Image: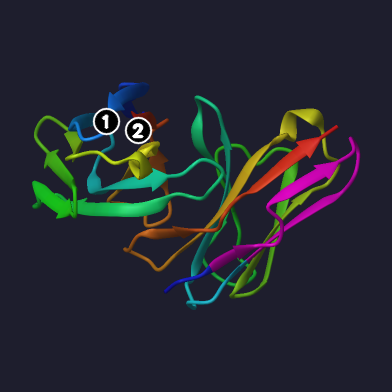
Amino acid sequence: KNQVEQSPQSLIILEGKNCTLQCNYTVSPFSNLRWYKQDTGRGPVSLTIMTFSENTKSNGRYTATLDADTKQSSLHITASQLSDSASYICVVSAKDSNYQLIWGAGTKLIIKP
Amino acid sequence: DVKVTQSSRYLVKRTGEKVFLECVQDMDHENMFWYRQDPGLGLRLIYFSYDVKMKEKGDIPEGYSVSREKKERFSLILESASTNQTSMYLCASIRTGTEAFFGQGTRLTVV
């Protein structure tokens, strides 16, 4: 069964600190992996998208990594800001379907001043 | 910028009412999706459409129907709202092979 699992479920860190969020998946055959940021009460917004051949991608202070062999991805946030408080969702799509996206439950990140 | 607009941010309806949630996108995307999001469960796919007048059931279609009469508009219908349909509803629009763009969400409360 195609699944995406994220850890931790929630995380609280102090402003200015770094953090890393984890995503493990069992989707096969793999097409791409995306990280989304979702502010409370808002729709998700894309941060990065990575295909099989990409193992790292950055978007400002966000850096995503992908290990297709171990089926793991991480999202690293550098020098956190209060505006980084949000849910971060890992989404994987399978190669044989352009339509089905398998969503993780998300990591709730809280940045404290 | 792609814009996906949902008709309401907040909605309160009574049990048994017929509820329409509208979603409009302005980028000529062929694929549109309706999800619901509940705490601890992530996004769950209700229905999706990959072309006008085409629709496919997602993971949790029971109690819902959809309509896609025009490419830019995808409507979610709750035929007879129930309290277990209280949730956040998210519409997404995708050009095949690219990222999903989401509307701002509709928080529906059924009382």
Residue B110 picture quarter: top right
Part of the protein shown in magenta: B4-23
Locate the C terminus of chain B and report the quarter of the image it occupies: top right
Number of numbered tags placed on the structure image: 2
Res. B16 mark: none
Residue at position x 40%, y 68% in the image: B95
> Mark 1 packing: few (<14 Cα in 10 Å), some, or many (20+)?
some
The answer to whether A89 appears left or right of B15 in the picture is: left
Q: Which amino acid does label 1 sit on?
A: Thr
Which of these two is toward me, B92 or A16? Answer: A16
Residue at position x 49%, y 78% in the image: B28
Q: Which amino acid does label 2 sit on?
A: Asn
Question: What residue sits right under mark 1 in the picture?
Answer: A26
Q: Is the magenta stretch mostly helix, strand or loop?
A: strand
Element on which disc 1 rests: loop
Identify the image's colour scheme: rainbow, by chain, secondary structure or one colour: rainbow
Residue at position x 18%, y 40% in the image: A79
Locate the N terminus of chain B and report the quarter of the image it occupies: bottom left
